[in-house]
Image (cartoon, rainbow, N blue to C red):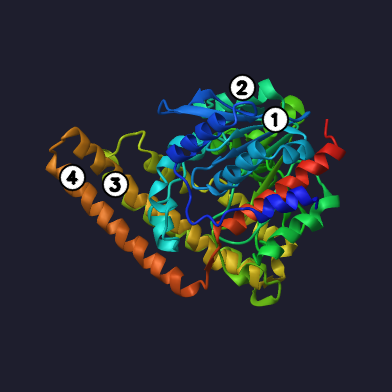
Amino acid sequence: MKQVYERLLAEIPNYKAFLTARELDESSFALAKEHPDTVSVFPFGETKEGRTLYCMKISGGSHVGLMFGCPHPNEPIGTMMLEHLTRSLAENEELRKELDYTWYIVKAWDYDGLMLNEKWLKGPYTLYNYSRNFFRPAGHKQVDWTFPIDYKELHFHDSIPETKAMMKLIDEIRPEFIYSLHNAGFGGVYWYETAATPEIWDEMRSAPKEMGIPMNLGEPEAPYCQLLSPAIYKELSITDEYDYMEKYGMKDIGDAIRVGTCSADFAKKLCGSFTMLTEEPYFFDKRIDDLSPADRTRRDVALEGLEWNARANEYLVSTLNRTLCYMDPDNPFRLALEAFTRNRSEEATRRMIDEDPEYARAATVAEAFDNLLVNKFYKLLSYGMLIRANEWELERMAAAGEKDEEKRAALAAAADMAAGEHRKLAEYLEKEIDYQVVPIRKLVYIQLKCGLLMAEYLKAHPQT
């Protein structure tokens, strides 16, 4: 790697905490004030709640790149990578010339949602604290999954304001390279890309190895993911899920999905943009990349994971229903729970597990760990949102001076009940998972190195 890039990576600060949405804005405006000839900040839209969305432009290159953090609001690793990269670009003319990109940068795309995650951003970074203060919106309220699409019987055109703003920005700037800064919660490192780039895969995989972070070699995050190479997948579109559900005999798929497609799909069709995601975790356990055989079949552990998940969803739904009559239809935690307990493709997954011969072999330790423990970690996040759904209503009552004691008592009781189950599951996972917390600096290093590799690759291998 070029020396100017090596220096950029070596100079990553030892971040101890994530920045809030307001802190990110303040940093952007300060940088633009310090470097007005190179950096500008402009509004490009508004959030659902009427907050201004800002984009930073760093001039100086013949290629056009777009990077955005927090496409999911519980995923702020990219915001810290952008903090380091934007300041380095502003201050270092050699770096700007070497990259030869004009960058458009949105530090926090789901700004409203990031504000609902603020209670865990400063730590402590534990399974309990992260899940207790976690928020992720329902699919039809997600900024990166409400792009319009018409595909077979799926017709989605209810894009939210943040999505409309990004559509307009992409149309105006026509980026060659989009770096969509997602990240996982638990597991290992893996990638998505619009088209295969085998020439740099070994270098990409070297980044987590340098930092001592495993790659995710267990189950993919969705059964229809197309594996290109170990830990590297083809970029997803909602059409992949549709085709998967259709393949395994599901009916009324258009009604079942209820979301749109993503920015990568939209931008590729609009102007041929290439998109990459580098997914990486806050927490990992060494079992996530252990390919030695477990003592059970992949089918057995996959079915056990599905059965546990179904029971957990029954609990979540039944507890939510206790106070649903008191909840605002737009309660963001309620909407998320209703969406995440629907399991729209479970029927197709069960058929796949039954029919695909790959599930008859022995599971790897990584696959068993994914199905039996990582699965529970991700459901723990919904347990946390169940508490918050009730707390959100209690906070609204207090703010409005509402005195309905029956309502207050019911919401408080449901929150307490949910808190007990959440703590029980969190304590179980704390005992069963030998997890490590990944330092933010290492996560920024991995994401930044892979972005640099791809930016260089695309200059030599244009996609349009």
Nearer to us in this view, 225 or 109: 109
Q: Position of residue 335 (x, y in %)?
A: 41, 40
Earlier in the chain: of badge 1 and badge 4, it is 1
Q: Which residue is mark 4?
A: 408
Amino acid type for the residue under numbered disc 2: Lys
Disc 4 marks which amino acid? Arg
Nearest-to-viewer mark from 1 and 4: 1
Question: Residue flagged by tag 3: what amino acid is it?
Answer: Asn
Task: Report helix, strand or loop for mark 4.
Answer: helix
SS type, badge 1: helix
In this picture, residue 414 sits left or right of residue 178 = left
Report which residue position mark 2 lands on: 168
Q: CA distance from mark 4 to mark 3?
A: 9 Å
For image coordinates 79% across by 40% down, the residue present is: 98
Residue at the bottom extreme of this rendering: 295
Image vertical order of residue 10 relative to residue 262, above or below: below
Please give the residue where the numbered disc 3 appears in the rendered image. 390
Give the numbered dot on residue 164.
none
Q: Is residue 205 visible?
A: yes
Mark number, residue 267: 1
Q: Which label's residue is closer to the chain start, 4 or 2?
A: 2
Which corner quadrant of the image does residue 330 belong to? top left
Q: Earlier in the sequence, mark 2 or mark 3?
A: 2
Q: How many other residues sit within 10 Å of disc 4, few (<14), some (14-19) or many (≥20)? A: some
Residue 276: % across, % down: 70, 43
Residue drawn at x 76%, y 32% is 176
Q: Is residue 121 above or below residue 258?
A: below
Q: Is residue 276 above or below residue 231?
A: above
User: Residue 129: where, in percent of width, then height?
Assistant: 39, 59
What amino acid is at disc 1?
Ala
Q: Quadrant of the C terminus?
A: top right
